[in-house]
Image: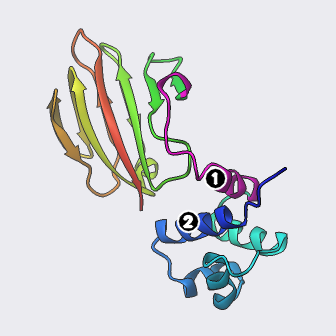
Amino acid sequence: MTSDPTDAIAARIKTERIARNWSLAELAERSGVSKAMISKIERDEASPTASVLGRLSGAFGLQLSTLLALAEQAGQRISRAQTQPVWQDPETGYTRRVLSPLNGSILELVEVSLPAGARVAYPPSAFTFQHQQIWVTSGTLAFKEGDVAHVLHKGDCLQLGPPVPCEFANQTKATCVYVLGLVKR
């Protein structure tokens, strides 16, 4: 027996709208779905059609399958260490572990291990859709934010400013580990 995902879809649509700081009117304008219908969907008073879901997911810049997957994962509130996705950069050996449950929450925690001597640069576009804080849990991180250089030691936490080119560097002989706190803008 399959469960009805309607309430999870309703919650996901509201979460996506709020994460973007959009009003009902703004989502209606972007999607072509009436404000009244979106309100009914979010209150779980109406079940959206595939066409309506397609228009809403398009307004969010998500594929319909992604929107539905996020809705299905909404109840997952725990992320076990053994199942957390880990990605390793083949060039630097940098590893990125997603600590947060994969449920599309507006908050995401990511642990990064930056090997000795490694350097990773990102363009401003990598920071456009999120607010970010860096908390160093071991080692020392040389972080360049535009023209401003920061040296962060174990326990230091930095909140990033507006999107600018950034560079994460480990200029020591020991691995640097830090946690990124990411919140969608």
Q: What stretch is highlighted in magenta?
A: 64-83
Lower sequence index among marks 2 and 1: 2
Q: Position of residue 138 (x, y in %)?
A: 22, 21
Residue 123, located in which quarter of the rendered image? top left
Q: In this view, does 158 lie above or below 175?
A: below
Q: How many labels does the image show?
A: 2
- Say whether marks 2 and 1 touch (CB < 8 Å): yes
The residue positioned farthest toward the top in the image shown: 173
The residue that disc 1 covers is 70
Tell me the chief SS of the magenta region: helix
Say left or right for 92 vs 2: left
Give the colour scheme of this rendering. Answer: rainbow
Dot 1 falls on a residue whose secondary structure is: helix
Dot 2 falls on a residue whose secondary structure is: helix
Q: Where is residue 55 in the image (x, y as percent from the top left)?
A: 74, 73
Q: How crowded is mark 2: few (under 14 residues within 10 Å), some or many (20 or more)?
A: many
Q: Which amino acid does label 1 sit on?
A: Leu
The residue positioned farthest toward the front in the image shown: 1
The residue that disc 2 covers is 16
Say left or right for 153 vs 13: left
Q: Is residue 177 above or below residue 26?
A: above
Residue 13, located in which quarter of the rendered image? bottom right
Q: In this view, does 1 lie above or below 83?
A: below
Query: What is the quadrant of the C terminus in the image?
Result: bottom left
Which residue is found at the position 15% from the left and 35% from the top?
156
Q: Which amino acid does label 2 sit on?
A: Glu
Q: How crowded is mark 1: few (under 14 residues within 10 Å), some or many (20 or more)?
A: many
Q: Where is residue 115 in the image (x, y as percent from the top left)?
A: 35, 15
Is 152 inside the magenta-drawn segment? no
Residue 39, located in which quarter of the rendered image? bottom right
Which residue is found at the position 25% from the left and 11% from the top?
174
- Mark 2 vs mark 1, CA separation in Å: 10 Å
